[in-house]
Structure formats: structure tokens, C-alpha cells
Image (spheres, rainbow, N blue to C red):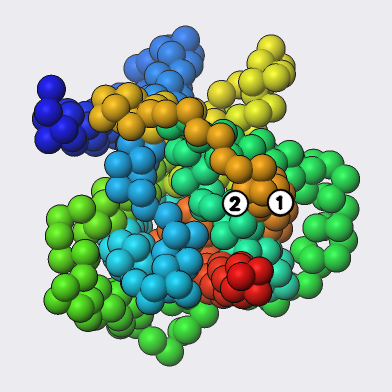
């Protein structure tokens, strides 16, 4: 089988994955149009279980798609920031802009059509903990440069056989778990989360009340489009690889919002007597609208693996497992899977990078995917602030490593 054929197989799998996810979304949506009054309690419970199963399967498939796309394209925010410092190449930055362009436009359309209630996602409804966003984003940004990959990339690297990536993943899980539930949680809650600004919510059009929603959306989308179109004529951006990678990654964010948003709305219709309303804590515990993120998800996945009998799988856990599986399958098909053990010095950076990433991501309420794409797509002010400082941290970290390298010569 030729290299081109192997690439074609991976592309075909990705297309099929998106098609299956669309079917799962339609399946969940159809449950909301049943005659609920004529269904028994047992039938309603069976439908809820079916919706839950569809969401989990969808999470695995969407994660799989993310893993396969990142593995084949080498998409990585850390690499993009490192290239800005070392070569001035903005190709991967433009791929991120394309992912943002697709995810913002798609998510806002889904919201306006009533398919996703973004007001009940954590990015909009959480208090505006400005110091957490700034410090957490900056620390996470430094961490991704040290680790040699962003939150999704280190999972992908582990899946394709890179032991340095595996070290970063395990350090990320350890640090994020300690910041969520362990010894660092008190620092996060008592010193960072208490510093808030009293916005009613974080939705940018609600904060900038003098500007119509459509003006804000158009300005952001045009800015992203101009940035992409200003690529030099000899840039790699003008091939098919990077624009399509950005589109595909943006679609994974969009489809994740879509399937969770539809499930959140449908389960209230199917089992309307079990919930007091969209703010019901029981409803939000599992069904809250969400998209891809790896800060909480990685820690939950590790806890699920080691405490399987006392835990239950959810969309986030399924998506993490899907990313690793997608990376592994894509690398096996294209014969790029290889066990790689970086030099000992690099292992040190992998370890410290993963630790910084885990603490920063939880503190900032998300990583470069969670806040940087999923949160940004909701037009959350906190997500925009976090991603700004992730980029500042990553560029600063890359400059420091470059200075350190030049000093050692």
C-alpha cells in the first residue's frame, strides 16, 4: 500500500467518523419528538440510557477524530508559538485561526438556532476569576513549550509511541488532579477563585451591550479571515494540509457542542418530571452543554481507570480515550508509529512541562482546547483572556529556551 493510499484511508475514516456523529446527533434529536405521555417509566429510562450511550459513543468518536487529525497534521499550539520565536513562521498559528473561525461561527449558529444552550456551559456561567485566567493561562503556556506539545498534542504523541509525551501526560494528570481535588486545590480556591469581577455572565455580547451580537461576530470572523489571507505566497499555508486540519479541528469542537447541546435539551423533554428546570444541579451534573477539553478530562480518565468500580464513564473520559485511540490507529495505518525515548534532558522538560500544564489548565478552567477553542467559540470573555495569556506564556517560554540554548553555545 502506497503512502498516498494510507493517507486516503485515514481521511476516509475521519469522514466516516463525522458522518456517524451526525447520525448520533439526529438520533438523540428524534427522541425529543416522541409522544412522551404515552410512554411508561421503564421506556423513558431506556430512552435516557440510549441518549447517554449516544453521547459517550459520540465523545469517543469526536476524540478519535481529534487524535487522528492532530497526528497526521502535527497541529500544535506549542509548535506554533515556538515557530513564531525561532523562524517567524505563522503557518500553524493560521491553522489555529481556521479552527477558531469554524468553531466560533458554527457554535454561534447552533446557539441562535436553539440547539446549544451556551448560557449553561461553564465558560459562560462561571464567575469571572480574572487572576486565575491570567496566571493559569500564562503558566499553561510556558508548560506547553517545555513539554513540547499542547494538551491534545501530548496525548497524541503518547498514542504514537513517544515516551516523552507519555511522561508529559502522566505529569499533567498528576498536577491537574492535585489542583482539582488535592493539595493544591486550597490554593486555587482560597487565593485565586475569590478574586472575581461581577459580570452577570461571561458572554461577550452581553458585556458589550452597546454592540449588536452580529457586529461582534463579524468583526472577530473578519479579523481571523484577514490574518489567514495575509499569509505569504510561498507559505505552506497555501497547501491543503493546514487549512483542512484547521477546519477538521474546528468541526470536532462544533460537533462536541452539538451532541451535548442536543442531549441537554432532549433529556429535559423526555424526563420533564425529574428536573426543576435548566438550572437543576442534577441535570447539570452530567448533561451540562460542553465541548472538548483536557484539563478536567485527563484527571477524570485516570481516576476512572484506577477506580473503575466506583466511577462511571462520561463524554470527557470517552473523548480522552478517543484521542489516544485516534492517534494510535492513524499512526499504525500510515506506519508512523514508533517507540521513541527522548534524551534524558528532554525527559526533564517533559516532566516539568506536564506539571506546569496541569496546574495552569485547572487554574484557568481549561487548556488551549478547552478555553482556547471550546470556550472561545462561545465568545466567553474569560476564554479570550485565558487564550491571550496562554499565547503570551508560550512565546515567553520559547524565548527563554532559545536564550538558554544560545547561552550554552
Mark 2, residue position: 147
- Vertical comparison of 33 with 408: above or below: above
What residue is shown at x 77% (from left), y 63% (from top)? 193
Mark 1, residue position: 352
Can see residue 68? yes
How far apart are the alpha carbons under marks 2 and 1?
Answer: 7 Å
- Vertical comparison of 26 with 245: above or below: above
What residue is shown at x 70% (from left), y 77% (from top)? 197
Residue 158: image tag: none
**Residue 162 x %, y %:** 51, 35
Q: In front: 381, or 79?
A: 79
Find residue 132 and report its image quarter: bottom right
Find residue 101 and report its image quarter: bottom left
Q: In front: 391, or 118?
A: 391
Q: Quadrant of the C terminus?
A: bottom right
Can see residue 293? no
Q: What crowding class fits label 1: few (fewer than 14 Cα within 10 Å), some (14-19), or many (20 or more)? A: many
- Vertical comparison of 182 with 372: above or below: above
**Residue 54 x %, y %:** 38, 25
What residue is shown at x 14% (from left), y 76% (from top)? 233
Using residue 215 as the reference point, say whether residue 233 is left or right of it.
left
Task: Tell me whether the residue at label 2 lies in contact with that at label 1, contact meaning CB atoms closer than 8 angstroms.
Answer: yes
Which residue is farthest front? Answer: 409
Using residue 300 as the reference point, say whether residue 2 is left or right of it.
left
Task: Please state the total of marks drawn on the protein image.
Answer: 2
**Residue 260 x %, y %:** 42, 40
**Residue 153 x %, y %:** 47, 46
* SS of the residue under disc 1: helix
Q: Quadrant of the N terminus?
A: top left
Find residue 407 and report its image quarter: bottom right
What residue is shown at x 84% (from left), y 42% (from top)? 182
Amino acid at each position: 500500500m502506497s503512502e498516498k493510499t494510507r493517507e486516503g484511508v485515514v481521511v476516509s475514516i475521519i469522514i466516516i467518523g463525522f458522518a456517524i456523529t451526525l447520525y448520533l446527533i439526529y438520533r438523540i434529536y428524534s427522541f425529543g419528538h416522541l409522544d412522551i405521555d404515552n410512554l411508561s417509566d421503564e421506556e423513558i429510562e431506556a430512552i435516557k440510557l440510549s441518549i447517554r450511550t449516544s453521547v459517550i459513543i459520540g465523545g469517543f468518536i469526536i476524540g478519535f477524530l481529534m487524535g487522528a487529525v492532530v497526528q497526521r497534521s502535527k497541529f500544535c499550539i506549542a509548535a506554533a508559538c515556538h515557530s513564531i520565536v525561532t523562524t517567524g513562521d505563522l503557518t500553524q498559528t493560521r491553522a489555529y485561526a481556521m479552527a477558531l473561525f469554524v468553531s466560533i461561527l458554527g457554535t454561534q449558529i447552533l446557539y441562535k438556532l436553539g440547539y446549544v444552550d451556551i448560557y449553561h456551559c461553564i465558560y459562560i456561567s462561571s464567575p469571572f476569576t480574572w487572576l486565575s485566567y491570567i496566571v493559569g493561562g500564562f503558566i499553561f503556556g510556558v508548560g506547553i513549550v517545555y513539554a513540547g506539545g499542547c494538551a491534545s498534542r501530548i496525548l497524541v504523541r503518547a498514542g504514537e509511541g513517544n515516551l516523552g509525551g507519555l511522561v508529559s501526560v502522566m505529569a499533567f494528570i498528576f498536577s491537574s488532579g492535585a489542583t482539582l481535588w488535592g493539595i493544591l486545590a486550597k490554593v486555587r480556591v482560597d487565593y485565586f477563585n475569590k478574586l472575581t469581577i461581577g459580570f452577570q455572565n461571561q458572554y461577550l455580547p452581553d458585556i458589550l451591550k452597546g454592540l449588536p451580537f452580529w457586529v461582534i461576530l463579524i468583526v472577530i470572523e473578519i479579523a481571523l479571515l484577514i490574518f489567514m489571507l495575509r499569509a505569504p505566497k510561498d507559505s505552506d499555508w497555501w497547501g491543503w494540509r493546514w487549512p483542512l486540519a484547521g477546519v477538521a479541528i474546528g468541526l470536532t469542537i462544533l460537533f462536541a457542542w452539538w451532541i451535548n447541546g442536543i442531549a441537554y435539551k432532549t433529556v429535559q423533554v423526555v424526563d420533564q418530571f425529574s428536573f426543576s428546570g435548566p438550572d437543576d444541579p442534577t441535570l447539570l451534573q452530567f448533561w451540562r452543554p460542553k465541548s472538548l477539553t483536557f484539563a478536567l478530562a485527563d484527571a477524570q480518565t485516570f481516576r476512572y481507570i484506577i477506580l473503575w468500580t466506583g466511577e462511571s464513564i462520561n463524554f470527557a473520559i470517552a473523548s480522552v480515550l478517543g484521542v489516544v485511540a485516534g492517534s494510535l490507529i492513524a499512526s499504525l495505518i500510515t506506519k508512523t508509529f514508533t517507540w521513541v525515548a527522548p534524551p534524558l534532558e528532554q525527559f526533564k522538560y517533559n516532566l516539568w512541562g506536564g506539571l506546569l500544564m496541569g496546574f495552569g489548565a485547572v487554574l484557568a478552567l481549561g487548556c488551549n482546547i478547552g478555553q482556547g477553542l471550546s470556550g472561545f467559540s462561545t465568545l466567553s470573555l474569560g476564554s479570550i483572556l485565558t487564550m491571550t495569556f496562554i499565547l503570551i506564556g508560550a512565546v515567553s517560554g520559547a524565548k527563554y529556551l532559545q536564550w538558554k540554548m544560545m547561552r550554552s553555545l
